[in-house]
Image: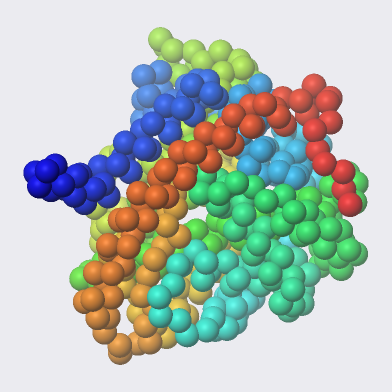
Amino acid sequence: MAVLVIGLLAVAGSLPYWLPRVVVGLRMWIFARINGEEGIPIPGELVPIERFRQVYADPATNGRSRGAALSDLFWYWLSPGAEIHQEHLEPGERYDQVAHATRRFLALPAAEITALAVRCAAQLPNSRLVRLRDLMMPLWAEFFYELVFAERCPPHARDLIVANADDVATALKCCGLRHMNRRHRLTDYLATRLDDVRQPLPPGLTRREQALYLQGTFFNTAVVQQSEASAHILMTLARHPELPAADLGAVIDETFRLYPLFGIAHRITSADITVDEATVLPAGSVLCFNYPAFHRAGFDRPDTFDPGRWESLSVRRANHIPYGIAANRPCPAWRLSPIALRAVIDELTRRFTFHSTAAQTRSLPNRGPCLMLPRGTRPARSALLFLRVRDRWEDVGRGLVQLVLGSYMVWDARRKRLCERHFTGVSTFEPFR
């Protein structure tokens, strides 16, 4: 009996070291079984790493959603408004109108971007034990609200934006189901503010679609991605206090290399693409561009966080595309985002130091547990030990939650077929209220 008890205790104590990996593998297997084959992996057998940019930049790599089973899942996670989301619009007049409107909103002078970002960061309260993504979301909610409406963000609007963005991010990471009431409340609010925006909205959209455009572009994608980006940058600084002082630009570049904000970008080919003399990708192929794999190829010690590597490397020539490729609809915030991120990180690291022993992965499902201390304060070893132990045990429970909820959402997305039914003319969207 004693031997059995000791054995059970040993197994239980070892759970954080092996169970999360097993659960992730099982979840990926279930996703593949329900969702089917995603497409042609790039880099992969047909498209080697040295052909990655060539294929990504090909004019025929321009399809977004139509015909890709994977699109149903992303539309499910991003709804309502996935049919208006700039990333998922097919090439054509509607995309051109939406993209032009987005560029106008984002075309602020660098000094104005910096000033706005610093002012938003300066309002963060003193905290001690934080989740970095949660800390960053109200900041970026206020930033993008002011960018869109040219006025300070009232608390009730900030709360609506954060609730929506957090719900989208949580569902994307399979850590929780969607709460559509949170999303609809923001849509309803934005519908009342369409006449107050600082730039013209896309003229080809109905008023309902204009509200969904604002929600998807600025208060889903922009808030979520900037929150994730700043959380990752602070997390890398927190996990590597032993590194000598490094240029912040190099820290950001190295963070995006190790933890790109995009995992897989899928595109559908509109014509045959000749990769080389032996390989042609036929029209209608679904191409899955793997950012993490591309960002690790061609680097010494690719899994090591080393900002110093950028002293001798050129970002433009390296396998490094954090905002995509210019020839294939890059992230519209490719200019604004790094300016704003640098301003926020500069302001926060001027006031605080960050320390963490929690795990950091690309998807950051733990939301970045961290000690945030006033400058000059040293973290207690007991607090860092607590972070490490708590995070490992949370990973056990979180993995099981992701397995159950992720499997359900993949199944539910395939059942609803939001993208497929949209392109066949069958309405699947809830009425605008």
299 over 165 or under it: above or below: above
Classify residue 231 as left or right of residue 61: left
Identify the residue at image location x=78%, y=29%.
422
Classify residue 229 as left or right of residue 140: left
Count up the numbered dots.
0
**Image quadrant where residue 191 sits:** bottom right
**Image quadrant where residue 312 sits:** bottom left
The percent position of residue 128, horizontal first and vertical second, equals: 40, 80
35 over 338 or under it: above or below: above
Report the front residue among 219 and 410.
410
- Quadrant, the N terminus: top left
Residue found at the very far bottom of the displayed protein: 376
Colour scheme employed for the rendering of this structure: rainbow
Identify the residue at image location x=67%, y=26%.
415
Identify the residue at image location x=55%, y=24%.
35
Q: Is residue 205 visible?
A: no
336 over 79 or under it: above or below: below
Report the front residue among 304 and 192.
192
Identify the residue at image location x=59%, y=72%.
139
The percent position of residue 421, horizontal first and vertical second, equals: 76, 25
135 over 128 or under it: above or below: above
Report the front residue among 248 and 35.
35
Report the front residue among 394 and 142.
394
Residue found at the very far top of the displayed protein: 278
The percent position of residue 56, horizontal first and vertical second, equals: 51, 32
The percent position of residue 5, horizontal first and vertical second, equals: 16, 47
